[in-house]
Amino acid sequence: MTMTEITADQVKALRELTGAGMMDCKRALQEAGGDMARAEEILKTKGLASVAQRASRSTGQGRIDAYVHFNNTVGVLIEVDCETDFVANTEEFKQLVKDLALHIATPSAPRYVTREEVPAEVLENERRLFEAQAREMGKPDNVIPNIVEGKLRSFYEETVLLEQPYVKDDSKTIQGLLDELSAKVGERIVVRRFVRYKVAEETE
């Protein structure tokens, strides 16, 4: 398909589907030969590739939302930030914040947003525990470090929000969920903080 065969209606339809800019949609359609599904995939791939470039950009807007479980025994308060109030007020961003609050309220119960937030003493305690377990199992000294690192990765997946499998779709992580919307809207999106309350559970 030639460039002149890409119609304004096609560009508009792809823009509505992806939220990408008009020129980006037109270029993607041209690259895909007019194939809408292929053009959407091209935009997604290019968008995800640019997510890393936005890592240092300021996130001065966002939303705070709350979720309380139906039996009123678990509650979550969360702040998710982006770059502009325009994105913060979109339905997709609002839904993302609600989905994240719901995820945190489930038994996945993350304790930290990122692995950098895990206190050094907690990591050291876990490392010593994993090393002792490996020695008790009779593992040779030369493989123990690899075993410990593997167990630490599992520890992060269990306790760090961004590294957990998304409760509604475990084929993606929470970080992957953020990256998808970031790629679509062209802004950096971060979970700033959250707090999770459970009845009769002591806080740290």
Image (cartoon, grey):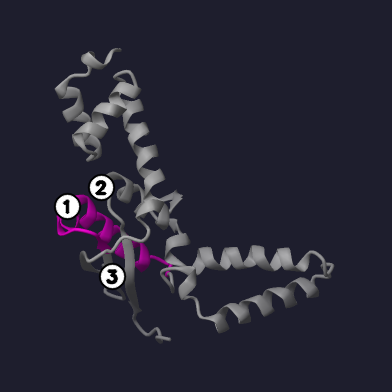
The amino acid at mark 3 is Ile
> Earlier along the polypeptide chain: callout 1 or callout 3?
3
Residue at mark 1: 90
Between the C-alphas of marks 1 and 3, the distance is: 17 Å
**How far across and down, in percent of the image, does residue 15 sit?**
20, 34
| Residue at 19% from the left image edge and 58% from the top image edge | 84
Disc 3 is placed on an element classified as strand
Say which amino acid is labelled 1: Thr
Contact? badges 1 and 3 (CB < 8 Å): no
Q: Is residue 7 left or right of residue 80?
A: left
Label 2 with label 1: CB-CB less than 8 Å: yes
Residue pictured at 24% horizontal, 27% vertical: 26
Query: Which quadrant, please, contains the N terminus?
Result: top left
User: How far apart, in angstroms, are the residues tagged by discs 2 and 3?
Assistant: 21 Å
Q: Earlier in the sequence, mark 2 or mark 3?
A: 3
Which quadrant of the figure has residue 200?
Answer: bottom left
- Residues in magenta, as a range: 81-109
Residue matched to label 3: 78
Q: Which of marks 1 and 3 is in front?
A: 1
